[in-house]
Amino acid sequence: MKASDLFVKALENEGVEYIFGIPGEENLDILNSLIDSNIQLILTRHEQGAGFMAATYGRLTGKPGVCMSTLGPGATNLVTPAAYAQLGAMPMLMITGQKPIKKSKQGRFQIIDVVDMMQSITKFTKQIVNGNNIPSLVREAFRLSTEERPGAVHLELPEDVAAEESDFRLFEVVGHRRPDANNKSIVSASRMIEEAKNPLILIGAGANRKRTSYALKEFIERTGIPFFNTQMGKGVIDERHPLFLGTAALSANDFLHNAIRHSDLIINVGHDVIEKPPFFMEQGAQKVIHVNFFPAEVDDVYFPQLNVVGDIAHSVHSLADMVDPAVHWDFSYFKKVKAEVDSHLHKYFEDKRFPTLPQRLVNMVRKALPEDGIVTLDNGVYKIWFARNFECYQPNTLLLDNALATMGAGLPSAMAAKMIYPEKKVISVCGDGGFMMNSQELETAVRHKLNLVVIILNDSSYGMIKWKQEAMGFPNFGLDYANPDFVAYANSYGAIGHRPTSDADFKATLDSCLETDGVHVIDLAIDYSLNHSILNVLLKESAEII
């Protein structure tokens, strides 16, 4: 069997549905092998978009998303998505081509050491030098990509290896049960929780597994311990729960951070410091129990007193069975914080000024979407407001990046989400800066007849950096630019462009777009002018409730 045919058979054996990417001369054998495959090639307009789509597929399904590029510049364009998947714990396989390795007549043309380049941003990277090794290397790549902590893997298939004859053999896809935590650690954690006076639960991205979500809900309801989440832990537990205190969207000094400081024990479920930390440990301050698939890496700001290492769902379920609510637990301060958080989250929700305030946008998007609707975010100052103010009812309904925190991922993520869940409403919220980094994928979305809504927040600047610039006392410099006519731009791709001129117009436009087929692009004027003053007042008011 031709090696490229064997490669595709190995991918089919793993249950691959899509390959996102841009083939080149060096992948033509694979491209030809895909013709009769049940794997669908999603031809994108840039490798970065393909990588973000593959990573999002991995995030939503738990199975590695697959993307493909040629050698050299195609492979280097996958570096950012590789880091995005690796830091965000999203399983993803990258396949890159390469010149023939046994005989080449082109010298070093376009050749860089892609395997070496990928070493620091993947869990596994390998050049295939013999077609007979393809089945074992594909199986190993998929195993490692999904093994906790999930992440990016990479295989390089040179042109001459892809064309050679190989023995047909496939390996059975064998899963494994994650080991349970040592019972002594569960007993120790139970004792620490019962002895604490103000325990508090933190939910991170690693808890975003179905079994863990069920176990956490059971633990919270049996014990009555309040909880909060990180940005990437949003939706693991329905945020309408009466014990939910909020999301740690700001680095420090939000109302929620008062509760964190007041707690004497944080039960940290599924969070690690690759995601921006929601609190910083200090010697002599509150204790932390680290509940995760892997031990905590000791860091200047994170050094837990106890590691409960093993399957998170089993650990949490065991704690739910073992921990008895203590009469000395005092959650009165947490209730006070929750009241303050709730009252401030809704501030500006009904402010109908135009251009639109980001808090108003959050409220309108939440009201327009059903409970299982999905919002994907690019990276910008609006991400803070969505993380802090957008109420998630189900897991994976607000897709944001708080690990690499890259721009350009919002639109491709929405496209992947819509492919996986065609029946769900999907909205991508992008800043004008982030949108333009992969805006060409509008053509891909239109070509594949995806029904989705893209909201571009138009302030003609890199707004988050501008906000930071102002906060640090620097003059306004170097962050403003001109945008294209986004309505005409969208229409040129075959999408449908809209430009609301008032709050009421935006609401009507958003509702209509969600009910109408096609790719809709809404050019929304956004007002960030209050960000600095709102946050200053927020920090002042937060300090006053201590």
Image (tube, helix red, strand yellow):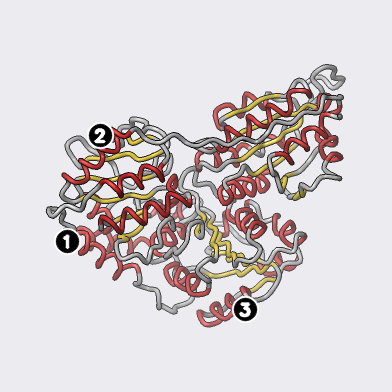
In terms of image quadrants, where is residue 497?
A: bottom right
Q: For residue 512, which numbered disc appears in the image?
A: 3
Nearer to me, 474 or 452: 452
User: Residue 416's spot in the image, x, y percent?
Assistant: 64, 54
Q: Is residue 334 visible?
A: yes
User: Residue 219's spot in the image, x, y percent?
Assistant: 32, 53
In this view, which residue lies farthest toward the top? 102
Q: Which residue is mark 1?
A: 332
Q: Local crowd at mark 2 within 10 Å, few (<14), some, or many (≥20)?
A: few
Q: For residue 86, which numbered disc appears in the image?
A: none
Q: Nearer the viewer, mark 3 or mark 1?
A: 1
Q: Which residue is mark 2?
A: 305
In terms of image quadrants, where is residue 86?
A: top right
Q: Are marks 3 and 2 in contact (CB under 8 Å)?
A: no
- Circle nearer the N terminus (3, 1): 1
Q: Report the number of numbered marks.
A: 3
- Circle nearer the N terminus (3, 2): 2
> Mark 2 is on which residue type?
Gln
Image quarter of the N terminus: top right
